[in-house]
Image: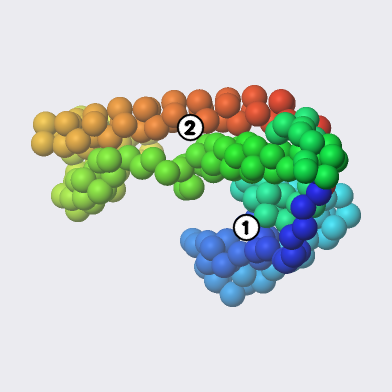
Amino acid sequence: MFKHKKIELTGKTNNIWNSYDFAMSGLGEKSKIWAKIKHVKRCLKWSKQRIARGYSDSDVRNMYGYLQILLPDMLQNLKDYRHGSPGFLGENYTNKDGILVNDTCHAEWDRILDRMIFLWKETDENTCSKKNLYDEEHSSASHEFSERYGFLGEKLQTKEEMEENKKRGGGCTVHFMDELPEYKEIAEKYREEERRLEQYRIACKDEAMDMLKQYFFALWD
């Protein structure tokens, strides 16, 4: 069954030349300008790889993250600009002119694609609709802990620990905020919520994979 929609260019969410990576490329480098020049060279290499073979080395290094962005983006594009829908969906019926038609497949395919798009976005922590309820409180407590005891909790080191580290040639013993009674509760609540969210994202991934298997050969236009 066919449908007509105007085709437009959509934004590229997996853009190699994104501003975030450029900003991070100079982090910790002595010369930020030289670091950005080197990043430009890497981006040129990756762009050529995408043109030549369809994917770059950077895509391979974070394949699951790349697909978490790519798949819902492509599915959204298919939904918005497709010309037709799978004929095995919907119901055939004879219209008033005596012609066998099926125009109900489009709405059903829309619902299926919407579900797949939603599920793939939910697998990504950054685009998931569910957030940690204790994130703000935990972030505030973590900042306070770092201010009081150092980023690695190094100010909580005992004399014995410092002496042992000195014998080893330096370094420090890391201490975490949940070791202190005043931070233990929020740290445990935050971790438990993170575990719950992880299980939710895994369940979304599993359902998304099942739908991908079911409709794999229908993903064309």
Residue beneath disc 2: 201
Is disc 1 placed on a helix, strand or loop? loop
Name the kind of residue labelled 2 in the image.
Answer: Arg
Please provide percent x and percent y for residue 101: 80, 39
**Residue 24 horizontal side relative to residue 66, left or right:** left
Residue beneath disc 1: 13
**Quarter assignment of residue 180:** top left
- Identify the residue at horizontal 60%, vertical 31% (top origin): 208
15 is higher (above) or lower (below) than 164: below
Could you say which is closer to the camera, residue 173 or residue 55? Answer: 55
Please provide percent x and percent y for residue 24: 53, 61
Q: How crowded is mark 1: few (under 14 residues within 10 Å), some or many (20 or more)?
A: few
Could you say which is closer to the camera, residue 97 or residue 92? Answer: 97
Name the kind of residue labelled 1 in the image.
Answer: Thr
Is disc 2 placed on a helix, strand or loop? helix
**Quarter assignment of residue 110:** top right
93 is higher (above) or lower (below) than 41: above
Quadrant where the N terminus sits is top right
Could you say which is closer to the camera, residue 141 or residue 210? Answer: 210
204 is higher (above) or lower (below) than 220: above
Please provide percent x and percent y for residue 81: 73, 56
The residue positioned farthest toward the right in the image shown = 52
- Identify the residue at horizontal 86%, vertical 49% (top origin): 53
Q: Alpha-carbon distance for marks 1 and 2?
A: 20 Å
Considering only order in the chain, which callout, 2 or 1, is on the residue closer to the N terminus?
1
Please provide percent x and percent y for residue 162: 24, 36
Give the image's coloring scheme.
rainbow
Q: Can residue 188 be seen in this view?
A: yes
- Identify the residue at horizontal 73%, vertical 43% (top origin): 103
Query: Which mark is drawn over residue 139?
Result: none
**Quarter assignment of residue 154:** top left
